[in-house]
Image (cartoon, grey):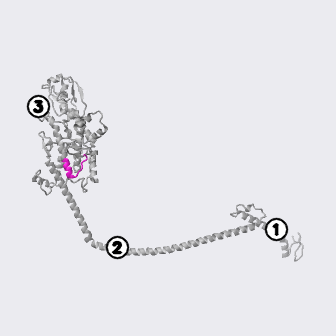
Amino acid sequence: MAAGCTVCFRDFNDKRNPTCASCAQAILYNPRIDQVGVRLQREKHHTHVDAIVRPGNDGIIASLPQDTDFETIAVGIRQDTLRKTTEERRVVEARIEDMLDKAEQLRTQLQHAKEWVAGVRKSDATRRSEIAAEKKQLQKQHSTVIDPVLSATAKARQRLEKVHNRTVDARFLLCRESALLAGLEKRKEKDGKVQYWLGGAPIVNLRHLARLKTSEAGGSAAACEMSRNTSHELISTGLGNVCRLLVNCCHYLSVRLPAQIILPYNTTHNATILLEEDSYEKDATTRPLPPTHRSAILAAARPPPEIQKDLIHAPRSLQFRKPLSQLFKEDHDEYMHFTEGAMLLAYDVAWLCASQGLNTIDTMGKVCNIGKSLYDLFLADDRARPPLLRNISGATTRTEYSRLATIAPDGPRLGAWSHGTAHHSLTSAVATSALVEWQNKLPTTSKLVERLQSLLTNEISGLEWDVVTVDREWDGELEREDTAVIVGGGGRHHDMGMSVMSVRPSDGAEDDVVARAIAVQMGLRGDKGGSGWMRVRSRGGEG
């Protein structure tokens, strides 16, 4: 503390107080010096702390001693930060300059693009106006340019439809004339049944192949034997006539059947038919073996593989040399092949009917009735068409054609669908869909063959049973026969294919009931008493 005032020169103590401003300054001098020292110390600590907590120090300043000149260090740090900031600013300014240059280039390109778009719009507007003018000109010329083309197209379509209709009428006429010239007709027998004939031979229903009418030639045994010997020849002749008629009509219709038919040629005297998978192939000319050679091969225990393959893919003959029951016993393979070929022929006829719009053949019974199918296809009145203005053959009279001309052609047309034309082609989607729909109603050909063979086998087995009467020629033989085989039971309905039972004959009412039941089953009626159905082992070598 100062000794005294420099103005009044007085010393200060407890009793003497300052009296002037100089005295007050002298009293406050030392406290002010202390306060300045404290402030300096505080500033030093503040600089140290600021240097420590500043970002980027990484603890370097914190490790410096307390007597370090933190102010110099802080100044250096600030200068370095300023230098870095200046460099970054320079870089940013350079990038901004580049961006401004790019923006200027983009503005220039945008301006050029706007000018180009404006030019395109102008050219489009010009072209649009030109197109509008051309459209108006074309509309003015439409009646003079387009209408003749449309008229010519319509006339061409009419001519095409007219030619197609005339072609269909010609096909129908050819098929009908072929059927009439071939002798296709429908006869009503004395018993009221309808029989179809072709070329003087009956067209047998395949379900009745085993039912040989041995009673038509009279009651004598010789007449019955003659009828049995000629029935199979008539059946073969009828099937051959059907094959010739089918081949001719398919040629007129330009239709290819599912199973190919091969007519007789130099070395084969009867018609044959190929399996569906073997038809219309390059190697389909394979012919069946001669009968003697074939029988010898079939009689072998194990034919060679190549022979087996040839027999499997060989054409099926439509002729059998013996009665069906005898063929079934003596040459079972030929019997199986004949029945398979006959069913394939019937399926061909049914398929031809379906392809020409007659799709009513949807059961096995209708498929087997070949004669009715052919008659309904070619000669039925509801399928008749007005004749062409051509010369009429002698097979059809003018009166009949004048009657046919009055029938309205609204039903299914024979000859409308064909494999040989693009118009109404059988390979089109519509025809294929219709044929597939028809085929779905029937079993497959293999199943049809199996059903026919099963039916004929059962009927052939039934043909071995005859009605005998004790009062007549079999009186003594009944007594000599040790065992007899009978079919059926009393008062019960028997379906085809039921089991056959072997029993010993007995006397009394039981024999009468059994005999009458069997007679009803086979369509006959035996006399009461000792009459009945019996299998005779010594008749004509059968049994």
Q: Residue sitting at 23 percent across and 63 percent down?
A: 156
Instruction: Quickly name the residue at label 3.
Output: 220
Residue 131, disc: 2
Under tag 3, what secondary structure? Answer: loop
Residues in magenta? 245-259
Query: Residues under labels 1 and 3: Cα distance?
Result: 171 Å
Quarter of the figure that contains the N terminus: bottom right
Specify the amino acid type for callout 2. Ile
Identify the image quadrant of residue 213: top left
Q: In the drawing, does residue 507 fall left or right of residue 96?
A: left
Residue 346: x %, y % from top left: 22, 44
Of label 1 and label 3, which has the lower sequence position? 1
Neighbor class of circle 3 (other Cα within 10 Å; few <14, some 14-19, many 20+) is few
Specify the amino acid type for callout 3. Ser
Q: Residue sitting at 14 percent across and 47 percent down?
A: 182
Q: In the drawing, does residue 116 fall left or right of residue 374?
A: right
Of label 1 and label 2, which has the lower sequence position? 1
Residue 123 visible to the viewer: yes
